[in-house]
Image (cartoon, rainbow, N blue to C red):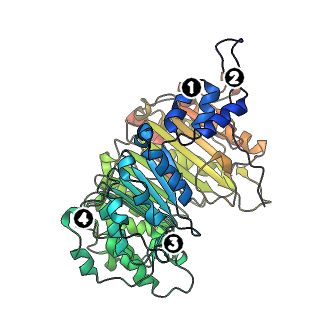
Amino acid sequence: MSDGPKYIVINFRFAVYASDASPTLPHEIIELIADFLWDEPVQLARCCLICCAWYHAAKRYLSRSVTIRSTRALGDLGHILVSKVNRPYGRSLRSLYIYENAEEPYAHTFSMRVSGCLLSKVEELCIFRLDWVTTRPHTSFFTYLNSFGTVTSLTLYQCCFRHAEVLRTIVDALPGLTDFALVSITVHSAPQALDSIGENLLPSAKRKLQSLQLSGCVSRDYASGTAHIESFHQSVLNVLAFYTNVNTLILDTTQFLSFSHFLQFFCAFPELHRIYCRKVPEWEPPSDEAVLNGVGKDMKAFTDVFLGEVSSAFAAVFFKLFAKRCCELRTFDIVLVDVPGPEFQAAIDKVLRHSGAVLRDFRCRYDQEQSQLGITPSLVYNTALERLDVTFTVASSLRTSWIYKTLLSLFTQLRSPCLEHMSICFSLREPGVDAGVNLDTDMETTSLDITIFHAAICHEIFSSLLPGRVLLQFTHRHPRSPSLGTSPFDAKPTPCELCTSIQSFVVPLFIPWLSRGVIQIHLPDGSLIVDPPCLDSGTPEVRSDNSPEFDRAVVRPALDSI
């Protein structure tokens, strides 16, 4: 059953004529003319120049990408491209998407029926649900595939192969390929010996790929009851591991059956610069630190690290292994699915210390307990940080003392005068359908508390912040939402009392930034605060004392008490 009404957007404009005396055409006739010209894209492009009505009628047949879902559609594309008049259309295409038809397979012949010479600008090729276990590729398939010399990105989605070496054959057949993505790929035969696969790869082939993506879940991709899954999938990893010049790796940890398999594959790429690891694996990371000794010593320094929706245990072990490889880290992004502990905090601090003044972009999102001070990143070493994005996901009851201490701890650790953007989000997660969300005002801010907070945010390192570059968000998320993000689609109506309580507590703290127009405060009901309160509202006077004496006498003792 559908969750709600579905809408089809139809772009429509009335035709524009030179004068009222000109003969007019019903819009249905314009649509029929565009339909008739479906195989003449150059004529359709000319139709787009007539007026808005003709433009919207013809544009639905014109795109930078082509999607093929049947052998007839493949034949139609070939028919269009062979016409000399349509050669400019072939040169305008950038992406080709091929969906295999299980009832009438055709993808095993597409490279022969549509020559790559007619698609001389296509850069992206995506093939979906290919099954070469039941239908083998044509004997000339790879010969003709070589004509797609401009393809730099190849994605294979839910494809089945007889053996893993087919992957190497496909890569070798595309001379310009640099980015290779495998999503839920399976093979159905035992692998060759690892050494024999390596002998078939020339040194130039090993240097070919620059980016490699491996997504899906091994235990779910293979049919239930399939024997030898581990050896079959290991053969895929063995083939991919020989492209040792890969510098960007995008991995789902669910593609590995153990931590040792993950580590062995990961360390096969000594030229890595950018790493993206996602999802929670079905295995537990090792607790014995002796296993981690000596790993990754020959790898180069990382420049970008993204860990998405991983456990804090996996993240802690990962950074214990590769913290020293983060001395050139520029972008650091981590999303956790659980509450981090001391080991995670120590590992993150070590990475931030090694990255030092090189780090430019830091983002972290994770669940947070309020039993203690929020685990805020230690950014004292990152003196050239330009972008900061922190999200704390908390239970339904949010305490004002915890908000105050977490924000104060975060701002007093910042040492970068280069900050261009800051986003701090408190995401309120309901524990149950009937449970409400409220703010526990366990702390009544005194004039001294507000003065200390003002002193922290009025520090000279924040003087270069431009208007609107700081976002403080309080969002309310559905319990069923799997995302740790703050999409407005996750929000639901929130009682006015909660927004009023948050506003009355937070606004006095940020009067200096509100006065400068630096900060925007987003409340759970979607309202936005950008202006400071009126002077007669009883708000304490703003004090911005940046002197070392004031810092030592007031701010530091307050932080020590926290």
Q: Is residue 256 magenta?
A: no
Q: Nearer the viewer, mark 2 or mark 3?
A: 3
* Above or below for 32 versus 269: above
Whichever of callouts 4 and 2 sits on the residue coming sooner in the sequence is 4
For marks 2 and 3 on the same chain, the one whose residue lies earlier in the sequence: 3
Q: Amino acid at mark 1?
A: Ser
Q: Which numbered mark, 4 or 2, is in the foreground of this view?
A: 4
Res. 208 image quadrant: bottom left
- The amino acid marked with disc number 4 is Lys
Q: Main SS of the magenta segment?
A: loop
Identify residue for label 4.
206
- Disc 4 or disc 1, which is closer to the eye? 4
The crowd level at tag 2 (other Cα within 10 Å; few <14, some 14-19, many 20+) is few
- For image coordinates 45% across by 72% down, the residue present is 255
The residue singled out by tag 3 in the image is 217
The x, y position of residue 364, in whole percent, is: 48, 53
- Give the residues in magenta: 3-11
- C-alpha separation, residue under disc 4 versus residue under disc 1: 58 Å
- List the residue tagged with mark 2: 536
Gap between marks 2 and 3 measured at Cα: 60 Å
